[in-house]
Image (cartoon, coloured by chain):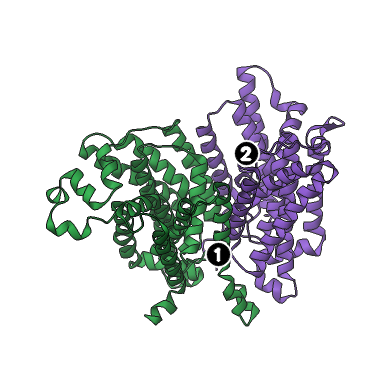
Amino acid sequence: MTALTQIRPADRPILIAFSFTILILLIGTAYTMSTTGTVPLLQPSYLMQQLQIGSFLGLCAAGMMLVILTGHIDLSVPWTLTSAAMIATSVGGPWAIPAGLSVGLCVGLVNGFGVSVLRVPAMIFTLGLDTVLRGLMVARTGGFAPQDQATPAMLYLAKSKLMGVPVALFVWIAVSLLVTFILTRTTFGRALYAIGTNERAAWLSGIRTRAVVTGAFVGSGLCAALAGVLLAGYSAKAYQGMGNSFLLPAIAAVVLGGTHILGGRGRYAGTFLGVVLIVLLNSVLSIMQMPEALRQIIYGTVIIGMLLIYGRGMRVSE
Amino acid sequence: MTRWIGQNRGFAAALALFLALYLSYHLIHPRGFSTAVLVQNSNELVAIGFVAMAQTVPVLLGGLDLSVGAIMTLAACVASWLLDGSPVQIALGMIATLAVGAGFGLINGLIVVYGRLQPIIATLATGAIAIGLALLIRPNPGGTVDGDLNWALTNSIYDFAETYGIANGGEAAWLQPFINIPVPLILLFGTACLVWLPFKRTVTGRTIYAVGSAEGAAFASGLPIDRARIAAFTLAGFFAACGGLYLAIQTSTGNADVVQAGAYTLNSIAAVVLGGTALLGGTGGVIASILGAMILRAVSFYFRILDIDPLLQPLIEGIVLLAAVSAVAFRTFRVKNQLELFR
């Protein structure tokens, strides 16, 4: 504990999340050793496969983090992801991926307009847009999974391997590097932190807060759309509700990585580790053949438990 | 009167919107202004109404409770085991169900106050735990609920009196002015008036509003802010359990449906905002949120009578929601000093 207190406060969540990830791996390995005598969790191929699945969540979390840093939240991720996947597969050909990404761009612009210009609370505006997107897609597809197939480019990005490493993992790492660069080395990135800390002060010091907040939502929309395009490639087609299981884990990953839910604080490395932690936790639980009920309980308990260690706020906030 | 409207602009707007929507619905409906339609509509309102009430209390604090839908589901699953047998057993089962919800809300409150976590993220996690517990209790949809109870609580007062043989089986003269009122409506507004209105007038209740307006000032004035927070989440759990209890009675089953729980949580936020309660806290109230839930439901009633393509329904629902919440933008364009926009 004394060593913990000497570490910079910003690094503590990252270290704790990292040690917790190791702990999950050890518990899972101990379990498989005792039941079957094998160690699948420590084999690189298994870890690669898990990270490949995790890359979809990782992309969503990267975008979500940009928005959470400004003190807002993006609840439109599930249907941005699904719409992008559906549009991409139905456009097809070389324009499939740009078409999918442009869906994310449009969603981000609308969200940014509603939140920063109309000043509707992000919680409710993005939720409303999510419902509208769902409505558009249901009206378009008739409520069924569209028959269009993913294009070869999408299949390549999501499924194939380059030098033994899944390409999806490369995509995630590339986006991660880009987000890290944006957050630490650009004025836009610094403005995200400034707005999350105190929007009023940021505006008074000349930051164009409307443009920056809109930029954060565009980033989130693009990331969710990219995740949708990849996920459609991974499962070879788009289907209804494919994004539903990404919203809450994405928020949880960002917060477990030490980003403050009210904005202004957090590092991307934490979010990355948060995603790895959630993915590994899920895979260990499924190796243990834990029933869904217990999985939910463990999932919730882990989030609460970890946050009680390092996520505690002030007793009274102003 | 004008003064009241000026002070409760959000509530008045919601009321006007609801009356316009609902009265014209009855005018178009082939069997409009009849008890049957009213009973059916109020039955569909109760669960979302209670969950919207539950969401309101933490929102008044400036927090958010993402576990209300999950607590409702948990309560419904508990109730589906307990609402059968002798009247005493049923009554105890109801009390137990409400106690489970309130207890879960209390845990939420304790985590938020003593764990010092942000409510939105703490309840996100406890919501997962509640769904897990609900799945443990009811791995598959099912359960038995007393048939009389189901019939009596989901119909008009006349049917209630007839089922239990009160007031000459509903024929007593003093009961006649009331026989057409649906029981679910009475349960909903009765709970709101008997629980919320007295609570709002206590020190703890006023403190909830004070914390939502200015937490630092509330603390400096010596108000019991910890107690108010714990009470708010406990009350949220209680109201959510009321919704779950009614859902179990209405459907005679318990179903640990994760998707449904999430939908109820999100709709409860929409209902709270439509009722005119500010998400930043400090203004609004539980009755207003019931009104918000009524507006949400009234919109969906139209789909049945207007012969709209079912595939377009989610789209229209979404657009109505988005348009309604964007109406607050009028304030944004009236503001003269832009600084006022940032809180």
Q: Quadrant of residue A47?
A: top right
Q: Quadrant of residue B194?
A: bottom left
Determine the CA span between mark 2 and mark 1.
30 Å
Chain at tag 1: B
Q: Residue at x 58, y 59 (%)?
A: B319
Dot 1 crowding, Cα within 10 Å, few <14, some 14–19, many 20+:
many
Q: Amino acid at mark 1?
A: Val
Q: Secondary structure at mark 2?
A: loop
Discs 2, 1: same chain: no
- Residue A150 on image: x %, y %: 77, 37
Q: Residue at x 58, y 66 (%)?
A: B326
- Residue A58 on image: x %, y %: 71, 44
Q: Which residue is mark 2?
A: A144
Can residue B227 be seen at all in this image of the molecule? no
Q: Amino acid at mark 2?
A: Phe
* Rendered shade, chain A: purple
Q: Nearer the viewer, mark 2 or mark 1?
A: 2
Q: Depth check: give the residue in front, A111 or B304.
A: B304
* Rendered shade, chain B: green
Q: Depth check: give the residue in front, A169 or A131.
A: A131
Q: Which residue is mark 1?
A: B325
Residue at the front extreme, as displayed: B30
- Residue B179 on image: x %, y %: 22, 55
Answer whether labels 2 and 1 touch (C-beta < 8 Å). no
